[in-house]
Every structure is written in structure tokens, then in C-alpha cells.
Amino acid sequence: MTPYLSIQRKNDLILFIIFLVGVLSGGCASLPESKGGNDFQKQYRAYQGYVRAGYGALNKKRYIEAIDHYSKAIEISPFVASNYYYRGLA
């Protein structure tokens, strides 16, 4: 039996120590970014609502309403290409 740890065992030990330090220090809950999570969640729910409403309006052939909903979704998240596509379809 060798007194040295294998590389895998060393990696496991290092990961366990990092995990243990994170848990004992309070984890990520103490970071200032996590306090703003509610605003992000509200904004994301609003975004999802606009996309769903736009899709529903597009299926009901209410094109102006669909354009408005997709435009609001684009204001919240301008990097989602499918919103531009569906707004163009409307």
C-alpha cells in the first residue's frame, strides 16, 4: 500500500474541502447579487407572460396585439431571436 493519494482522491478531497468551506461560510446567500433575485424573477415572469400572450394572440390572428406583446418581450430580453421572428410573422 502506497502512502500517496491518487490524483482522483486528491481531486475529491479538494472538492470536498471547497464544499465544506462554502457551507460553513454561509454559501452564496451572503453575496449581494443574490438579494436582487426577486427583481430578476419578476422580470423573467413578465417576459414569459408577454411571449405566451404574443403566441396566443398570433394563433388567434390578433396581429397588432401579438406585435405589442412581442415588442414588450424584446424590450426585456433583446437577445432572443425567436421573438423578432414571431413579431415579424405578426
Image (tube, grey):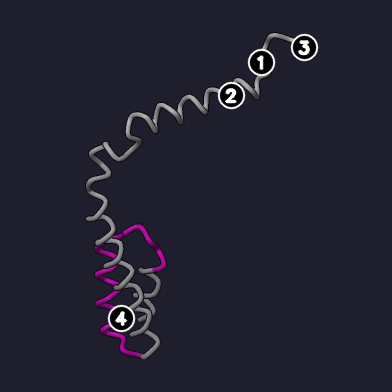
Label 1, label 4: how far apart the Cα atoms are: 62 Å
Ranked by sequence position, the earlier of labels 1 and 4 is 1
Ranked by sequence position, the earlier of labels 2 and 4 is 2
Q: Residue at the spot x=26%, y=51% of the render?
A: 37
Question: Of tags 3 and 4, which is closer to the observer?
Answer: 3
Q: In this view, does 76 lie above or below 22?
A: below
The secondary structure type at the circle numbered 2 is: helix
Q: Residue at the spot x=65%, y=24% of the render?
A: 8
Towards the viewer: 90 or 31: 31
- Residue that mark 3 sits on: 1
> What amino acid type should be assigned to the residue bearing mark 2?
Asn
User: Where, quadrant-wise, is the N terminus in this rendering?
Assistant: top right
- Residue that mark 4 sits on: 66
Question: Of tags 2 and 3, which is closer to the observer?
Answer: 3
Towards the viewer: 27 or 37: 27
Question: Dividing the picture into quarters, in which one does residue 80 lie?
Answer: bottom left
Label 2, label 3: how far apart the Cα atoms are: 20 Å
Percent x, y of residue 55: 37, 79
Percent x, y of residue 58: 36, 84
Ranked by sequence position, the earlier of labels 2 and 3 is 3
